[in-house]
Amino acid sequence: MLNMLHVIKLYKRLTTLYLKSIYLDYKRLLYCNVNYKLVLLMKLYKLSDGIILQHNNANYLIQYDWDALINRDGLYEYLAGTLAGLPIVSEELAKAHIENNLLPPIGSQEVWAAGVTYLRSREARMEESADSGAADLYDKVYAAERPELFFKSMAHRVAGHKHEVYIRRDSSWNVPEPEMTLFINSKGNIEGYTIGNDMSSRSIEGENALYLPQAKIYERSAALGPCLYIPEEAILADTTIKMSISRDNKEVYRDETSINRMKRKFDELAGYLYRECDFANGCFLMTGTCLVPPNDFTLQPGDVVSITIDGIGNLVNTVSFKP
Ligand code: DO4
Ligand code: MG
């Protein structure tokens, strides 16, 4: 015989189950329906044992070849369309995976970089190259129709979030360069964004502009991460980039800027890069720096560089010499 207490308990249980199922339906609708207004952004984390797709507050596991996945045209729409069939990973598990197994969001792509795209970068280069007589080059390239584009790195030299970045032993003046970094697919479409650090030797570049490749390309001179950010629409024009540098747990530099201070358009940079180059699996393009520490600042081993870009997240690297 059911007494009153049993009836109340049963009623409570059924109500909880009912509310839970409504909540789950609501979540599925939110995360799976491409046409639903709240579908806004995706983040792909490349891990040593798979890929985690973060969409709003849910995490999904993807087993897919990284290069083939990120090179898809209409990446956002593709990911949104696959959500319903993907296994969901709990927040704790996703956090632990990202904490322990995170790689830079790059496969076999090349990394290129644009230079002197902000007034602040032009000023800094003109100062550092004053003695070499090359200052004019930077002034001219800032104003020119054709942007400065240079090869930066192959994937094996790229550090990820929380990995070490290196400074050169033969350089006396070293800085990080925080840069909005585009992922452009093989068709030339900008499909995603990540945070980039274009580690640079100002003393080597300042000595002679022809030393640029040595100032820019060496082991771990590039960092990318923590994820590939894929918004439904192009990243907002007033997106902020912040950088702080800590030494012995004390902040020694902090500044921020907005990407709308850039002289060039992202499409313009991508267009020049793809004019006469093919990239079978797409390409990463760092878009130049606007944050330059004062001229008496140089990085030291042990310094911690933290770069934050609105929406994408935080890329943290400790500075070291190559062992
Ligand atoms: O012109 C040399 C490099 C410039 C650069 O890396 C930048 O402006 O970010
Ligand atoms: Mg740069």
Image (tube, rainbow, N blue to C red):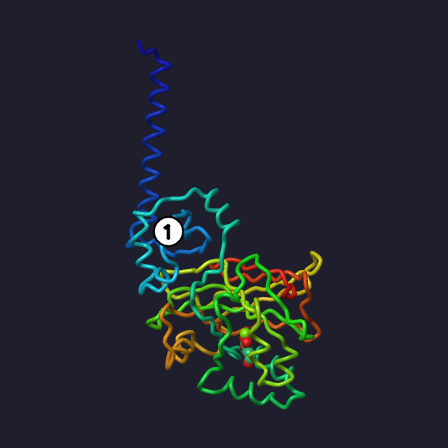
Quadrant in which residue 81 is drawn: bottom left
Residue 253 shows up from this direction: yes
Give the image location of residue 147, x and y in percent: 46, 82
Three-letter code, disc 1: Ile
Q: Residue at x 50, y 65 (%)?
A: 156
Residue 296: give x, y in percent of width and height.
71, 74
Q: Nearer the viewer, residue 3 or 69?
A: 69
Q: From the viewer's perspective, is 82 left or right of 306?
A: left
In the displayed structure, 181 sits above or below 17; it is: below
Quick one: quadrant of the C terminus?
bottom right
On the rendered image, what quadrant is the N terminus found in?
Answer: top left
Near mark 1 (Cα within 10 A), the count class, few <14, some 14-19 or many ≥20, is: many
Where is residue 24? Give x, y as percent: 34, 39
Left or right: 134 as drawn, with respect to 55: right
Q: Is residue 163 above or below residue 221?
A: above
**Residue at the disc numbered 1:** 62
Ligand 1 quarter of the rendering: bottom right
User: Would you say 318 lies left or right of 28 here?
Assistant: right
- Taking the view exactly as shown, the residue that stands out farthest to the front is 323
